[in-house]
Amino acid sequence: MRSDVPLRDVTEADLPIFFEQQLDPDGNHMAALTAKDPADRNAFMEHWTMILGDDSIAAKSILLEGHVVGYVASFDRLGKPEVTYWVGKENGVRHCYQGAFRVRAPLKASPCLCSCCQR
């Protein structure tokens, strides 16, 4: 498990990568919340435009060897911090990056509780 995962602010240039990642049927099966139609690029772009324009949402791109491999984001839901993330399997990344959850100041994230981080 990595603890030194580099993060940076999400940019519009990252969005095509995220779009392609979220088309993965296995990822959609595992995700808690997914788009009604993952292939709807316009809906995807509208959603991310909203995210990037909302200062209350902290969204970071996860990097591996300088390449974007996913994202982690934090937002408040009903007064409690929520964390969402997606890591593309095409990069050979088969587990979540606990290090991405260590950035508590901008993300306000609690420790990762997923099974792969509890090993």
Image (cartoon, rainbow, N blue to C red):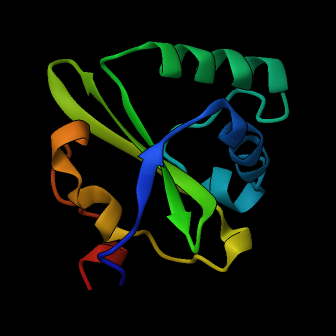
Residue 15 x, y percent position in the rendering: 69, 37
Q: In this view, does 4 lie to the left or right of 71?
A: left
- Quadrant of image for the N terminus: bottom left
Residue drawn 71% across the image and 37% down it: 13
Q: Is residue 50 left or right of residue 99?
A: right
Does residue 106 lie above or below 46 as drawn?
below
- Quadrant of image for the C terminus: bottom left
Q: Nearer the viewer, residue 69 or 118?
A: 69
Q: Nearer the viewer, residue 108 or 79?
A: 108
Residue drawn 16% across the image and 42% down it: 105
Residue drawn 68% across the image and 14% down it: 46
Residue 39 x, y percent position in the rendering: 85, 34
Q: In this view, does 41 lie to the left or right of 83?
A: right
Does residue 61 lie above or below 117 as drawn?
above
Visible in this render: residue 83?
yes
Q: Is residue 2 left or right of residue 42?
A: left
Number of numbered discs: 0
Does residue 33 lie above or below 119 as drawn?
above
Residue 82 x, y percent position in the rendering: 28, 36
Residue 10 x, y percent position in the rendering: 53, 38
Single out the residue that lies furthest toward the front.
66
Residue drawn 58% across the image and 74% down it: 65
- Dividing the picture into quadrants, the one containing residue 60 is top left
Visible in this render: residue 30?
no
- Dividing the picture into quadrants, the one containing residue 98 is bottom left
